[in-house]
Amino acid sequence: MVKKGGKMIQWINYRVRVTLTDGRQMVGNFLAFDKHMNAVLSDTEEFRKVKPKRSGELEKEQKRMLGMILIRGENIVSITAEAPPPPQARKPGEGLVIGRAKPVEKGIVGGTFDKAPPGLAGPSVLGGPPPPPVSVMLNAPGRAPPSRPPPPAFNP
């Protein structure tokens, strides 16, 4: 089975030279490709050879800056690596840090709490707090107290 992406994935972020069917060459940072071999290049420069008007003159190479471009895969003849990707610049303090992590105590005065406030605790599992007594559940908000008679229209 062939690896997804094949050999093209290894050239991502490299500076590449793409030769097109019309003879132009594009040099840029290789960002992406797809199954049709469409390619996305950034910071791209186009190089093309201009034929002289007179037969005795030399060919000139014109260069122009294009920026980010998408090249249709059917126009690509070859892709050549020119330079590897630039090394990642590390910021000071990035990476391994010597020390100990400490939680941030923002807005809590007087220490920490051992339990969550009632109603915010998660589901009780093995080892969790016991469920509330039945008498508390019967007098819960939204329920009628147990000593109250049924409504007049209620005929059991």
Image (spheres, rainbow, N blue to C red):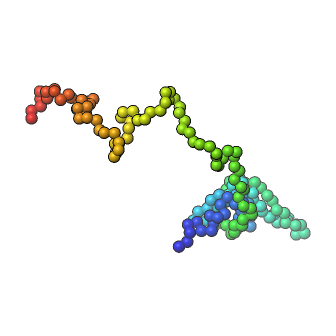
Residue 78 is situated, as x and y percent measured from the top left of the image, at: 69, 69
Instruction: State the image coordinates of residue 4 (x, y, percent, origin top left).
Output: 55, 66
- Outermost residue on the bottom side: it is 1
Left or right: 19 with respect to 142? right
Q: Which residue is at the front of the view, 42 or 72?
A: 42
Residue 41: image quadrant is: bottom right
Residue in the foreground of this view, choosing between 137 and 149 = 137
Q: As drawn, is 150 to the left or to the right of 64?
A: left
Identify the residue at the far left of this view. 155
Q: Nearer the viewer, residue 107 or 50?
A: 107
Q: Position of residue 2 (x, y in %)?
A: 55, 71
Relative image position of residue 37 (x, y in whole percent): 61, 65
Residue shown at the point (90%, 69%) measured from the top left: 56
Q: Is residue 55 above or below residue 142?
A: below
In the image: residue 106, left or right of residue 98? left
Number of numbered labels in the structure image: 0
41 and 147: which one is in front?
147
Quadrant showing the C terminus: top left
| Relative to 20, 55 lies left or right | right
Identify the residue at image location x=78%, y=62%.
Answer: 48
Q: Is residue 89 above or below residue 34?
A: above
Residue at 74%, 63% (x, y): give it: 82
Res 153 visible: yes
Residue at 62 percent across and 64 percent down: it is: 9
Eyeballing the image, is 50 above or below 121?
Answer: below
